[in-house]
Image (cartoon, coloured by chain):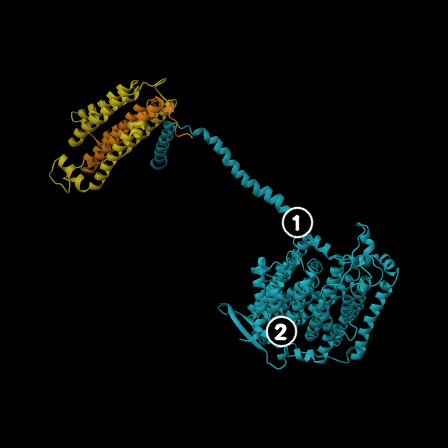
Chain colours: A cyan, B orange, C yellow
Amino acid sequence: MTPIIFIPLLPLIGFLVVGIFWPFFKGKGHFIAVPLMIGSWVIATSEFFKSFTNPPNVTFVYDWIRSGHLDIGISLQYDHLAAIMLFMVTTVAMLVHLYTIGYMHGDSGYDRFFSYISLFSFSMIMLVLSNNLVEMFIFWEAVGLCSYLLIVHWYERRPSWLAANKAFIMNRVGDFGFLLGIFLTYSTFGSVSFAEIFPAISSHLHQTVNIASAFHGSMNIPVLDLIALLLFLGAVGKSAQIPLHPWLPDAMEGPTPISALIHAATMVTAGIFMIARMNPLYNAAPFAAHVVAWTGGITAIVAATIALTQPDIKKIIAYSTMSQLGYMVMVCGLGGYGAGIFHLLTHGAFKALLFLGAGSVIHSLSGEQDVFRMGGLRKYIGLTFVTMLIGSLALSGIPPFAGYYSKDLILVTAYQQGPLGQILWMIGVLTAVLTAFYSFRLMFLVFGGKERFHSDQAGHGGHGIHPHESPWTMTVPLVLLSIAAVVAGWAGEHYGVLEYLAQELPIPHQDPVAGGMSDSALKGLSVGVGVLGIFVAWAFYGRESSIPGSLAKGLSFFYKLSLYKWYFDELYDLVFVRSSFLIGRLFWQELDKGVIDETVNGVAAFFRNSGLGLRRYQTGQLQNYAMVMAIGVFGLVAFYLVFNRM
Amino acid sequence: MVPLSWYVALSAFLFITGLVGVLIRRNIVVVLLCIEIMLNAVNVNFVAFSDYLHLIDGQIFVFFVITVAAAEVAIGLGIIISLFRLKESVNMDDYNLLKL
Amino acid sequence: MMQQLPFIYFGGMALVCALLVVISRVAIYSAMALLGMFVHVAGLFIILDAPFLAGVQLLVYAGAILVLYLFVVMLLNVHSRGTMLQRQTPWAIILSLLAVGELGYLVLTSHFYPKLPAIPHPTVPTLGNTETIGMVLYTQYLFPFEVASVVLLIALVGAIVMARGRSGVRQG
């Protein structure tokens, strides 16, 4: 038995023990869950370092469904892609487990929380290790379920469960597409296993499927494109790409460790992981790949513009996550799967860092999330400030931090993929400016300038809040993650992450001289735009300035567009929610009350009235009954005479 | 020779007489008497067919009918006695026990 | 005509007695008219070559059942208060007239077999009426015969239980 099976097994045990026996822990759930998660991380790390030399292997666990030609097993496919993903997932999960001890201390649902994040870690590890589409779908759903359970952790709060329902329902739309994609895969290839699908792709290149056959129409499209698009719909939901993105910012209603673990580092990257895993399919489906690339690019720029004006610290980071996910999806659509996964890994580190730092800030201010009510926190929570500064620099793509290497790789890869790539490259560069701007807007508003929280709190009885540094269980993960945010990019480039991943993710053909800009010019440009963004942020928010206010007035249309998130929520409310209510009300008032209720009540009233009428005939007089019987007998005789004799 | 149809007609008239008695009389004892008339009407029919078809089975049935009539009279009169104890009345319309 | 005279007498008298049962105001007259009907029906049985049944008719009906009726009529104060007839009498009369019409029509239009030549009963060739009934009753109809005995037993017990009343049960 390989040690790989213990990587998912240990968090599962943690979930079962803490989940089943939670009443006995009474706030001591971390004594079970955290050591098990650390054990899982140790195994994942050692296996990761062994994977440089060991060949990929598949560990068969058990047969799940075997029916005719359908053969679905639970197997652990451990190759380079899975190894590096597992390394990142277990690292972040382990650190978030640690951080949770401090952040959730004293919460009524403390042990429940630990059991759920252990379950989530198990599901995510299994998702990464799955070797067929059905297994992947099961754990794809399982991480979605955990996300739901954890967003709704504070279930007494209305925004919590609204956000959880929104996340769940929006993911259903995407998962529906994923499921249809699995069905079509099975009907096309006769198998759902990656090892059997990929070699068969070349023989289905010109096969088409008539999607209008149910309506007796004829609309043939290539089957590989359709499969790729349907699977991508799942990724759109899971990775919060436009148009299925509004759940991600709302999901920030959950506790901050969840935002870091699920909604920044791991679960939302499952979509990118899935695209990378299915890369032979996307390489064979050019149209679908274009859709993927454009979706990613549009998401990146739209999310970045929204992040510019948000007042909530967690929502800023959430939109930033969306924007970075857009980057990854975009470069995957252009064939740069390795670059996408590389950015996924570094992003996992620095985005988890940013979220945990934001959690530390919120914790120190006893729950305040509005950046306009912070300010000047640098001298109170210095360690948090330093780690968040590292995270922001990494996000902005400033060397030598991790984001520089991976984002740069994405932009270079995009640029060298021909005209389409260059258009998307321009979007990417523009997004990079915005990214640097909103990251440092957040930094200046939170840590620099005047203290805006005292004055606001003075009205409430005079006792202001005193910011305090977080306990060591929270700061240790921050420090470790900031080290990762510094070195992950350098290590990835130095040790050749692309070559490492090339086993599963082929490096796209690149044209170094296309477009006329060399590698180093591109790198210089992306660093330059990062610095430009930071400078603009300083000019706007780093000092006393009237520019933001006057810009908001002068460009009020764009300001409102950004502040109200491009009105996606309102649009969906109008198109889906209101119309559903309208149809529902129509059926309720007209059909249910008007037709069905009337029918049912009418039947009841008919029998009631006829019973009232017929009651007179129950006299209790035996001879009346005998009379009726006699009438019946001679009536039958009369009937016989009339119809048979005459 | 008496035709069979005469017996059948007699039986029918006897039966209807008994039926009318059951339907119109208020006295509960007379109603029971009228039931006896109806049973006898049937017996006449049985015996007539038995004779005309030379089958003894009709007479056997009459034998059983008489047996059942005896049992019915015993039970019926027992019921009448207990009802009379209950209400001091032999009128049919005083007993509407079938009505809830 | 001579052959039909006994039938006309017995049948007519039976019918007249039956009508008397129905129309007599006093219950004891009804009972006495019923006795007349039984006797004349017994006469009809004799005409129909069923002397054993005629005897049973006289013994059981006239001897036992009717005596039972007379006891009850005399024990209880059976004088009904108010009218003799039910309210539904007119409707019952109309129904009976309709029934007479129907059955009369049926009898008139039906085709009856003529009297068959006397063939002996297959199983009991040359015995008389009483022996024949006895043979058939204790062979072919043995099971119904036993059931009839159980019916009589139940009637016996039931009649005793009901006639004794509640006080009798308590004392027992």
First along the sequence among labels 2 and 1:
2
Instruction: Kindly identify which chain the residue marked by label 1 belongs to.
Output: A
Figure disc tally: 2
Under circle 1, the secondary element is helix
Residue at 69%, 72% in the rendered image = A345
Say the numbered circle drawn on residue A581. Answer: 1
- Which residue occupies the foreground of this view, A271 or C143? A271
Please determine whether, in this image, residue A378 is positioned above or below residue C55: below
Q: Is residue A245 left or right of residue A218?
A: right
- Label 1 amino acid? Phe
Residue B47 position, x and y percent, is 21, 33
- Label 2 amino acid? Val
Q: Is residue A444 left or right of residue C84?
A: right
Q: Which residue is mark 2?
A: A42
Circle 1 Cα neighbour tier, 10 Å, few/some/many (<14 / 14–19 / ≥20): few
Q: Quadrant of residue A344?
A: bottom right
Instruction: Kindly identify which chain the residue marked by label 2 belongs to.
Output: A
